């Protein structure tokens, strides 16, 4: 009787067969695989590769038999089920293939090819059953769902072309599915084809008038197009159709209130009332019992301060938050980061290291978040997002910490009476001018409410580019929703007063050629030729983004919603900014920033002076270049970048807030004892 071959000998025979196989010598490889099986009938690799050869030769039944036999010995091998599924498809058995793909995925073969195969198998099954009995609906809908999930996966992976192909197929198979249509629109927005997304969103809102996702995204898109009033009306109509949707409270905060900051036709008083109404309604609808506040009211102990934000990532708030976190005195403050971050990035990890404690809260409900804050014994809880995207502002409706505040991420009141304080300064919010617009008590920091830390890879400023080009270039990289019709008319007046001057605008919507044309058409109404308007889409990378300031001589700030990060970036790159100051916070941030760097004369109070100031800057190129050369050092030496001083000011404010709370507890205790 022959001795059983050693494992080493079998491995050598298998490797020899695989060399022939990879070289295309299929017959010799097949002979050697069979030889391996005669010595080791349960050899999974040989069984699988014989199946592969069967498929390569077009003998799919034979291939299926080999894979089936291999599965009988290794039923939990995901790759074998995948191979069997492919053979089943080739044999014209899409139902069997679908089941095999599903088993492969369930066993861990959750690679994209398996999902692609399962989607294709479901589609083929819909054709087959439709031909057989005329009722392909089950398989057709299943196939649509498979392609839809595939589209979402590709979308998350930023594989635009593949995602579009999958969504197209999903919508073709199930054209009445509002969510599929809506997410196809989301994909088109992601890849910059915004005008193509609009009709899809409109279709989704028609298919399902209660789908807040579709209504909100359409409203947001129209907001980017500058169609503020239509966007607002659309959102209001969505809420009227189904105000009980669980997403409605969040969406109302995220969109309806945020958009008020962009509308020049809405007075600060009207915007304030809308915020207050929202806050009152939110609190009235909460049945949750109060959380007992049991923090130790010692006025001088280390304070536990929590910061809540969805933007602990590559986001503009990072440039203002990180200097504070880096300079907090750990002898007086212990920091907690409550991160509602859906897609963490390297900045997330860097910020995480700046906090002493970190909590991921994306999966927490508001109730769970409040319980976590209470367990952490937070003394002062600070909102950093207001009514911006993915905010957790609703979690502040029931107090979970003794003191609450809001700062940085939002240019107006939250409208919540359960938030005690709002950080600002005397320039952005002069005493007596804006206090009544807020439900919070305004805390005016002495050297400004912002401290800026520029990106480490920012390029050096260049000489003002008109010296080389001979043409003055104005520019703005602000959110284009801020570029209202009044702003466009004003900027057109500047361009018409400076011969041959150009305007450089940058925004994500300019990836869409239709939207580029719309923008140049808006300037053409005021006599500005299209070739004088230079439009750029978003540029990957901070260094490249800042490098674009090398093409700009003078920055123009929009109004009534001024820029913040964009103004700081322009100044850091040596570009002076002209701003128009109004009578509420969002319209006075430019004045606050320019005052910190001794450029308050560039912040004016009326449109005529705004135009005149920009034109005057453009006429004195020598002075403009001198200003540019020294602007970075001027900024570096200013309070706007004094992080140590800023941190001490914030900590002093925290201590004053805390002591005020402690005093109230002491007074309360005394009144109890007196009775």
Image (spheres, helix red, strand yellow):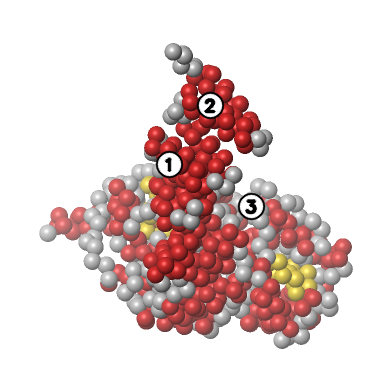
Report the front residue among 133 and 217.
133
Q: Nearer the viewer, mark 1 or mark 3?
A: 1
Question: Which disc is residue 68 wearing?
Answer: 1
Q: Residues within 10 Å of mark 3 (few under 14, many from 20)?
A: some
How far apart are the two marked residues, 2 and 1, measured between alpha carbons?
Answer: 19 Å
Q: Nearer the viewer, mark 3 or mark 2?
A: 2
Residue at mark 2: 35
How far apart are the two marked residues, 3 and 2, measured between alpha carbons?
Answer: 68 Å
Mark 3: secondary structure: loop
Q: Residue at x 82, y 58 (%)?
A: 463
Mark 1: secondary structure: helix
Report the front residue among 115 and 442.
115
Q: Quadrant of the C terminus?
A: bottom left
Q: Is residue 654 above or below residue 189?
A: above
Mark 2: secondary structure: helix
Q: Is residue 368 above or below residue 137?
A: above
On the question of residue 202 being in view, the answer is yes
Q: Residue 234: image x %, image y %? A: 46, 81
Q: Nearer the viewer, mark 2 or mark 1?
A: 2
Q: Are marks 2 and 1 in contact (CB under 8 Å)?
A: no
How far apart are the two marked residues, 1 and 3, measured between alpha carbons?
Answer: 61 Å
Residue 632 placement: quadrant? bottom right
Residue at mark 3: 454
Q: Residue at x 81, y 62 (%)?
A: 464
Q: Residue 403: image x %, image y %? A: 35, 57
Q: Is residue 645 left or right of residue 578?
A: left
Q: Mark 2 or 1 closer to N-term?
A: 2
Q: Are marks 3 and 2 in contact (CB under 8 Å)?
A: no
Q: Residue 144: image x %, image y %? A: 46, 65
On the question of residue 424 being in view, the answer is no
Q: Residues within 10 Å of mark 1 (few under 14, many from 20)?
A: many
């Amino acid at each position: 009787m022959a001795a059983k071959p050693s494992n080493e000998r079998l491995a050598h025979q298998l490797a020899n067969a695989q060399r022939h196989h990879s070289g295309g010598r299929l017959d010799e490889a097949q002979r050697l695989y069979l030889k391996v099986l005669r010595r080791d009938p349960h050899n999974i690799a040989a069984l699988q590769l014989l199946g592969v050869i069967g498929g390569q030769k077009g003998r799919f039944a034979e291939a299926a038999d080999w894979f089936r036999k291999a599965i009988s010995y290794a039923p939990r091998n995901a790759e074998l089920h995948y191979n069997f599924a492919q053979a089943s498809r080739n044999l014209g058995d899409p139902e069997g293939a679908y089941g095999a793909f599903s088993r492969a995925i369930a066993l861990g073969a959750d690679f994209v090819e398996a999902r692609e195969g399962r989607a294709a198998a479901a589609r083929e099954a819909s054709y087959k059953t439709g031909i057989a009995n005329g009722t392909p609906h089950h398989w057709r809908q299943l196939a649509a769902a498979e392609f839809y999930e595939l589209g979402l996966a590709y979308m998350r992976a930023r594989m635009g072309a593949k995602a579009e192909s999958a969504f197209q197929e999903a919508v073709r198979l199930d054209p009445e599915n509002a969510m599929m249509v809506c997410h196809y629109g989301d994909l088109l927005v992601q890849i910059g084809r915004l005008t193509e997304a609009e009709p899809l969103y409109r279709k989704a809102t028609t298919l399902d008038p209660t789908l807040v996702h579709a209504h909100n995204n359409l409203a947001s898109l129209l907001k980017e197009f500058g169609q503020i009033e239509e966007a607002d009306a659309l959102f209001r109509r969505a809420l009227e159709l189904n105000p009980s949707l669980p997403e409605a409270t969040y969406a109302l905060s995220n969109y309806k209130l945020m958009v008020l900051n962009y509308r020049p036709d809405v007075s600060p008083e009207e915007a304030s009332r809308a915020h207050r109404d929202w806050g009152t309604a939110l609190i009235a609808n909460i049945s949750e019992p109060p959380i007992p506040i049991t923090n130790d009211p010692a006025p001088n102990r280390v304070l536990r301060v929590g910061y809540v934000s969805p933007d602990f990532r590559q986001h503009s708030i990072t440039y203002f938050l990180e200097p504070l976190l880096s300079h907090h005195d750990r002898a007086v403050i212990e920091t907690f980061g409550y991160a509602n971050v859906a897609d963490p990035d390297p900045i997330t990890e860097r910020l995480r290291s700046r906090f002493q404690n970190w909590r991921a809260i994306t999966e927490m409900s508001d109730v769970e978040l409040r319980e976590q804050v209470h367990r952490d014994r937070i003394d002062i809880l600070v909102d950093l997002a207001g009514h911006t995207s993915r905010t957790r502002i609703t979690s502040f409706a029931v107090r979970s910490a003794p003191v609450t505040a809001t700062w940085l991420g939002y240019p107006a009141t939250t409208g919540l009476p359960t938030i005690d304080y709002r950080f600002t300064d005397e320039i952005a919010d002069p005493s007596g001018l804006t206090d009544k617009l807020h439900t919070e008590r305004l805390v005016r920091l002495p050297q400004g409410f912002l401290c800026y830390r520029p990106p480490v890879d920012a390029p050096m400023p260049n000489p003002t580019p008109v010296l080389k080009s001979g043409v003055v270039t104005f520019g703005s990289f602000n959110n284009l929703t801020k570029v209202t019709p009044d702003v466009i008319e004003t900027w057109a007046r500047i361009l018409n007063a400076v011969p041959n001057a150009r305007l450089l605008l940058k925004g994500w919507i300019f990836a869409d050629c239709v939207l580029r044309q719309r923008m140049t058409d808006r300037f053409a109404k005021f006599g500005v030729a299209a070739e004088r308007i230079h439009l750029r889409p978003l540029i990957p990378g901070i260094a490249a983004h800042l490098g674009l300031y090398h093409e700009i001589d003078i920055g123009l700030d929009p109004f009534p919603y001024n820029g913040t990060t964009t103004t700081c970036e322009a100044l850091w790159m040596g570009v002076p900014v002209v701003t128009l100051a109004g009578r509420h916070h969002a319209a006075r941030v430019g004045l606050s920033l320019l005052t910190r760097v001794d450029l308050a004369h560039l912040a004016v109070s009326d449109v005529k002076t705004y135009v005149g100031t920009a034109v005057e800057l453009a006429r004195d190129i020598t002075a403009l270049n001198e200003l540019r050369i020294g602007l970075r050092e001027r900024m570096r030496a200013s309070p706007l970048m004094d992080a140590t001083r800023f941190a001490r000011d914030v900590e002093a404010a925290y201590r004053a807030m805390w002591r005020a709370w402690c005093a109230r507890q002491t007074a309360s205790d005394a009144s109890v004892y007196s009775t």
